[in-house]
Image (spheres, rainbow, N blue to C red):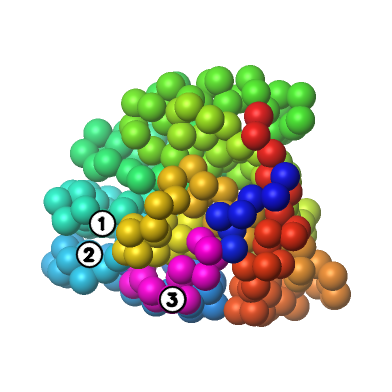
Amino acid sequence: MRFEPLLKISNLTRDFSPLIHCITNYVTVNDCANVLLAIGASPVMADAKEEVEEFVSISSGLVLNLGTINSRVANSMLLAGKKANELGVPVVLDPVGVGATKFRLETALQLLESVRFTAIRGNISELKTLTLGVGAVKGVDALEDDAVTETNIKAFGDILKPFAKRTESVLVATGALDLITDGESVLGVENGSPKMAKITGAGCMLSCVLCAYVSAVVKSQSPFSMLETAAAATCAFGFFGETAEMNYRGIGSFRSALLDAATVLSGDDLVNCAKIKRI
């Protein structure tokens, strides 16, 4: 289906250049900063408890990523998240590997109890774990049995809808087929490349792109829903991967090509190439 909001939403990050405060993991922090710059946003990467609230107060969006979580950073996330809520700054949660250890799950649940998230992005296993309060993942990857497909996407949507309603968040479950729900509607996004799973940080980068899109929509006071905005971000990032795959030579050049694709993104390209369907 043609998804007309893509044209305008994808241009907003360049028009409004939102400052995105990322408390993210040290494995992918450079990629996250670069993809934000590529789409026209501005990144700040700060996790010291002494300054996170100050940075949030001048930012347009906040990303909390559990990839390399520890007690110090968890405390900073709580402070930043609460300040963001106080100021009306959108917050995106990336619950990396949340079902892998007790500490990750407890940290994520504490954040969910204390902070209201505009969007939560993870693989389907991570989101199921948050929904049920218990679960497992394969390291930071989704379990094979949890792969979202054409045949089970509605069933997975029904599982996630109550959690989306309860948290008042848009959920983005990414994989070969992406699932997006706001608790009422479910969208499927098929844009992307299998090569994206071969590099570190693809999910982390998408969470930052998602936050930038959400923040730009809020900052511009545009009429787009958070469901539409999340679909636009997910589709755009998938399109970056598709474009990068066209001249694939290896994962090193693929990473660079993905950032190049993000830099030259055209809203017209997205509208014409979007693979979004309502479930």
**Rendered residue at 43%/76% (across/down):** 15
Q: Nearer the observer, disc 1 or disc 2?
A: 1
Name the N-terminal-most of marks 1 and 2.
Answer: 2
Q: Is residue 15 shown in magenta?
A: yes
- In the rendered image, residue 185, in percent from the top left (x then y), is placed at 53, 30
Check disc 1: other Cα within 10 Å, few if <14, some if 14-19, many if 20+: many
Does residue 231 sit above or below 33 in this rendering? Answer: above
Q: Nearer the observer, disc 1 or disc 3?
A: 3
Q: CA distance from mark 1 to mark 3?
A: 18 Å
Helix, strand or loop: magenta stretch? helix
Q: What are the residue bounds of the magenta stretch?
A: 8-20
Name the amino acid, label 3: Asp
Query: Left or right: 247 with respect to 48?
Result: right
Q: Which mark is residue 146?
A: none
Q: Which mark is residue 56?
A: 2
Q: Is residue 235 shown in magenta?
A: no
Q: Which mark is residue 15?
A: 3
Q: CA distance from mark 3 to mark 2?
A: 21 Å
Q: Which mark is residue 89?
A: 1
Name the N-terminal-most of marks 3 and 2.
Answer: 3
Tell me whether the residue at label 1 lies in contact with that at label 2, contact meaning CB atoms closer than 8 angstroms: yes
Tell me whether the residue at label 1 lies in contact with that at label 3, contact meaning CB atoms closer than 8 angstroms: no
Name the amino acid, label 2: Val
Name the amino acid, label 1: Val
- In the rendered image, residue 111, in percent from the top left (x then y), is placed at 28, 41
Does residue 219 sit above or below 261 in this rendering? Answer: above
- In the rendered image, residue 153, in percent from the top left (x then y), is placed at 67, 28
Q: State the SS at label 3.
A: helix
**Rendered residue at 38%/38% (across/down):** 169
